[in-house]
Image (cartoon, rainbow, N blue to C red):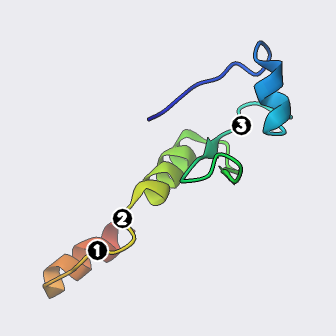
Amino acid sequence: MLAKVDATVEKEAAGLFSIQGFPTLKFFSGSVQEPVDFNGRTSTEIVNWIKKMTLTETEILSTGEALTAFLAKN
C-alpha cells in the first residue's frame, strides 16, 4: 500500500511522525512506531529506495547469467 498524507492539514499525524520538511517519505514495515526514513530528494532516488525497501530478503540466482543480470541492475 502507498499513502499520501498532507501534513499541513493532518497536523496530528505530522507531529506523531516528526514531519518537519516536505516531501517526507517514511517506509513502514511491521511496526508503525518504527518507520524507516528516506533522505533523498530526486525522483530517481525515491524510485531506487522504494525498490530496495520492497525487495525480498533472499533471491535465488541459479545461473551465472542470473548473477550477472542481478549485479547489473543492483
Position of 69 with respect to 24 (left or right) is left
Mark 3 or 1 closer to N-term?
3
46 versus 52 height, above or below: above
Q: Residue at x 36, y 64 (%)?
A: 56
* Residue annotated with mark 1: 59
* Left or right: 18, with 70 as reference point: right
Residue 61 lies left or right of residue 36; in this view the side is left
Instruction: Indicate the secondary structure of the residue bearing disc 3.
Output: loop
Q: Which residue is mark 3?
A: 24
In the rendered view, would you say 17 is above or below 11?
below
Residue type at mark 3 is Thr
Q: Nearer the viewer, residue 69 or 54?
A: 54
In the rendered image, residue 16, in percent from the top left (x then y), is placed at 81, 35
Q: On screen, 43 above or below 31?
A: above
**CA gap, disc 3 and disc 2:** 24 Å
Q: Label 2 near label 3: C-beta < 8 Å?
A: no
Which residue is located at x 65 percent, y 40 percent?
Answer: 25
Residue found at the far bottom of this picture: 64
Percent position of residue 54, x then y: 42, 55
User: Which is nearer the eye, 65 or 38?
Assistant: 38
Q: Earlier in the sequence, mark 3 or mark 2?
A: 3
The residue tagged 2 is 56
Q: Amino acid at mark 1?
A: Glu
Q: Is residue 64 visible?
A: yes
Badge 2 amino acid: Thr
User: 62 or 27, which is in the foreground?
Assistant: 27
Q: CA distance from mark 2 to mark 1?
A: 7 Å
Residue located at (67% from left, 42% from top) = 41
Q: Dots 2 and 1: beta carbons under 8 Å? A: yes
Q: Residues within 10 Å of mark 2 (few under 14, many from 20)?
A: few
The quarter holding residue 42 reads top right
